[in-house]
Amino acid sequence: MDLLRLGIVALAVALVPLWSAGQAPAPGGKLVEKPWEKLSHRRLMEYGEKALGGDPGKWKHGETEHFVFHFQELADAQLVGEMAEAYYRQIQKDLGVTQDRLTRKNHVFIFNDRDEWQRFFKTTRLDMGAVGIASRTELFLLSPGGARFATGLLGHEITHCIFYRFVPNVVPLWLNEGFAEFESLHVYAKLRGLDETRYSHRRPIHYPLKQLLAATKYPKTDVPKFYAASERLVRFLLTQQDRRKFLPFVQMVASGAKSEDALLFIYHDQFKSFAEFAAAFEKFNQPPPRQEPP
Ligand SMILES: [Zn+2]
C-alpha cells in the first residue's frame, strides 16, 4: 500500500455543483452511462478489484474523458464526473504539462450503502473512519443516503488521483498533501470566480520548515497544521515564484532528490542558501495587513 499516495477525509457534508447557474460545466465532464462490457477501460488495481467484488452487475457504470465511474446514483456520478474533469484541466494547466503519462482512465467508486463501504474497508484493511480515499489512480467515496461529500475534500482527493497521472513516482509528503490542499481551493475558486485569498492565507502558520520538508510520516499530533503548512509552502512556490519551475522541481524530488537540495537547485537564481529561502517563505507566511474599513 502506497501511503504517500493515500488521502483520507473524515467528514461528510453536502456536495454542491462547481458551477454557478448558467455556467457551462467543463468539456469532457459529461458522464455517459454504459454497461460494464462497453466501458473503454476495465482494468482495475488491487482496491478497485475488491470494490467491484467480482460482480460488475452490482454497480452502474459510466465514463467521462479521463475517469470511469462505478455508482448507484447517476446524479452523484454526474456531479463528481464534471468536477473531476474540471480539476483535471486546471491541474494540467497549473503544472504546465501537456502530456498525460497514462492512457488508462482513473476509476472512481461511489458507495451509497454504509455497510457495503465498511465491508470494502475490511477487505482492504484501510482506515475505517474515512469517507473518501484516493489510492494511485483509483478513488473511493461514500455518499450515504444523499448526504454526499464536501466539494473541498473531494477536490483534495481528486487532485491526488490526477497528480499521479502526471508524476509517476512518490513525492515528499508535504508536496503531495500541500499540492492537493492548494488545488482543492484554487480550482474551486477559479471555477466559481471567487477571490481565493479571502479563504486562504489569513494567518501565519508556524511549523518547523526543515521538519516539514523531511517528513515521511504524518505527525502524531496537529495534523491539520501539517496540511496547512504544506499548502502554504506549495502556494509560495506556485504563486510567488516562476510557475514554470514547479514541474521541474516536482520531477527532481520524484526522482529521489531531497526537498531542500531540489529547492536550492531549481530556484538558485532566487535563493543562494536555505536560510535565504526560509526567510523569503517566512515573509510570505505573514499574511498581508487587512484593510480596515474607514
Ligand atoms: Zn491527501
Image (cartoon, grey):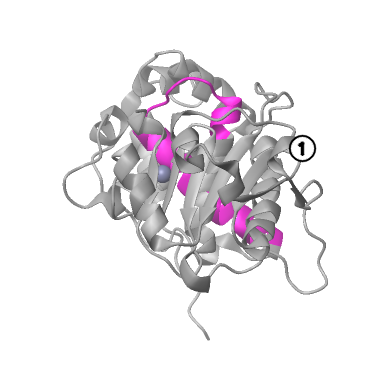
Q: Is residue 230 left or right of residue 104?
A: left
| Percent of width and height locating residue 164 | 54, 30
Figure disc tally: 1
Q: Is residue 46 left or right of residue 215?
A: right
| Percent of width and height locating residue 289 | 44, 65
Front residue of 292 and 259: 259
Quarter of the displayed picture in which ligand 1 can be seen: top left
Instruction: Judge whether 200 appears above or below 97 on screen.
Output: below
Front residue of 220 and 6: 6
Q: Quadrant of the N terminus?
A: top left
Question: Residue at coordinates 41% horizontally, 55% vertically from top-left?
Answer: 116
| Percent of width and height locating residue 234 | 47, 40
Residue 172 is covered by the magenta coloring = yes
Is residue 45 among what the camera can see? Answer: yes
Q: Quadrant of residue 238?
A: top right
Instruction: Judge whether 156 appears above or below 1 on screen.
Output: below
Question: Residue at coordinates 48% horizontally, 47% vertically from top-left?
Answer: 140
Front residue of 93 and 110: 110
- Per the picture, the main secondary structure of the magenta-coloured stretch is helix
Question: Residue at coordinates 47% horizontally, 42% vertically from top-left?
Answer: 51
Q: Which residue is mark 1?
A: 38
Residue 112 is covered by the magenta coloring = no
Span shown in magenta? 163-191
Question: Residue at coordinates 60% horizontally, 27% vertically from top-left?
Answer: 43
Q: Quadrant of residue 22?
A: bottom right
Q: Quadrant of residue 273?
A: top left
